[in-house]
Amino acid sequence: MHMLTIAELFEPRNTVAWEHLSRLTYPWEALPIIHDIIMEIGASLDGSEYAMYENDVWIHKTATITPSAFIGNAVIIGAGAEIRHGAFIRENALVGDNTVVGNSTELKNVILFNGVQVPHYNYVGDSILGYKAHMGAGAITSNAKNDHSSISVSYGAGAGDGAARGMGAARLGRGVDGGAGADAGDGTEHALNAAQLGGGGVDGGAGAGAGDGTDSAQFGSGGAGVAGSEQTVNALNEGGRIETGLRKFGAILGDHVEVGCNSVLNPGSVVGKGTLVYPLSNVRGYVPAGCIYKRQGEVVDIIPK
């Protein structure tokens, strides 16, 4: 499971949240506490560099914000960031230095490392995008299962959809690797408390988002929020699956990941460093680092030039 850890997915210090992330093992453990992370970092920012606004918003003075953009509660926007026309930053968003948040892109409960680009019609919710990760036009994270059950991360040989590394990997002498869908039918729910399994939603405004029906669920449904004060459960189940205990969890992209246009990252997707995802892909579970994801069942290694 080392490939799913923060240490493996991200290089250090490419986000102001690194000190907080480095205390955790898995990146999704940060999702219920993003609000708290933002509030703690915001209180420590240099007032000569950042302007503070109402609703706990901090914007670096070198950032460019288009007047038509919407910025909600608990948001940090870093140096040199570009927030373009029609961007919708809802709440609990840490937008790193030199990022691009583009036209009609929506962010909710996210950490974007420095240099991330989500420039055209993207939805990124309950997710973490690593250094210089890029999502092509129309690519989205789906952050809730349509049955509202808790989300697991599947990985390894034989998991779920059997996303083997295909013939390309066989020619390279690599074994079967890859991931299953986050909505593989385990049917198991790990109750942290009644709020998570009921309609409790956000605890003190700090959680991963209340189930208001506006999130990008797999079929447009919402879902209950995760209490911000609770800790994520990481229960290893049989078959290479980690139960996160979260009902809202979009995707984790490692550093330098490229996601092609109009791709869907299903709940609980984790993509390793430097991997390229083809356009129109339907991604589930763990995709190894340094690969090309062509479609389910065909994931091949990148061959250095």
Image (cartoon, rainbow, N blue to C red):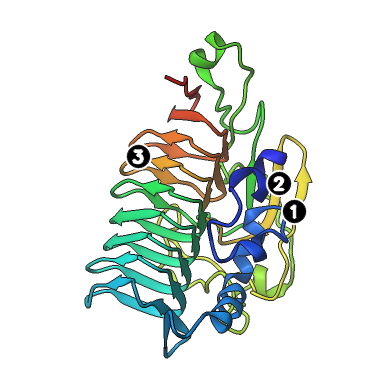
Residue type (three-letter) at the residue carrying disc 2 = Ile
* Mark 2 Cα shell of 10 Å, populated few (<14), some (14-19), many (≥20): many
Quick one: label 2 or label 1, which is nearer the N terminus?
Answer: 1
Q: Amino acid at mark 1?
A: Asn
* Nearest to the observer: residue 59 or residue 33: 59
The residue drawn where x is 64% and y is 18% is 175
Give the structural element (helix, strand or loop) at label 1: loop
* Label 1, label 3: how far apart the Cα atoms are: 30 Å
Q: Is 119 on the left-hand or right-hand side of 214?
A: left
Task: Of the two numbered discs 3 and 2 on the same chain, state the one appearing first in sequence.
Answer: 2
Do callouts 3 and 2 mark residues in contact (Cβ within 8 Å)?
no
Distance between mark 2 and mark 1 Cα atoms:
6 Å
Report whether residue 44 is seen.
Answer: yes
Front residue (pair 152, 121)? 121
Specify the amino acid type for callout 3: Gly
Task: Identify the residue at horizontal 38%, vertical 60% (top origin).
Answer: 98
Q: Quadrant of residue 278?
A: top left
Q: Where does the C terminus fall, quadrant-wise?
A: top left
Identify whether 304 is placed above or below 185.
above
Q: Are marks 2 and 1 in contact (CB under 8 Å)?
A: yes
Which residue in the protein does label 2 denote?
A: 242
Residue neighbourhood size for the residue with mark 1, other residues' Cα within 10 Å, grouped as few (<14), some (14–19), many (≥20): some
Q: Residue at x 63, y 70 (%)?
A: 33
Judged left or right of residue 183, residue 123 is left
Q: Nearer the viewer, mark 1 or mark 3?
A: 3
Residue 87 horizontal/vertical position (percent): 29, 68
Q: Nearer the viewer, mark 3 or mark 2?
A: 3
The residue that label 1 is drawn on is 234
The residue carrying mark 3 is 260
Q: Nearer the viewer, residue 293 or 249?
A: 293
Secondary structure, mark 2, is strand
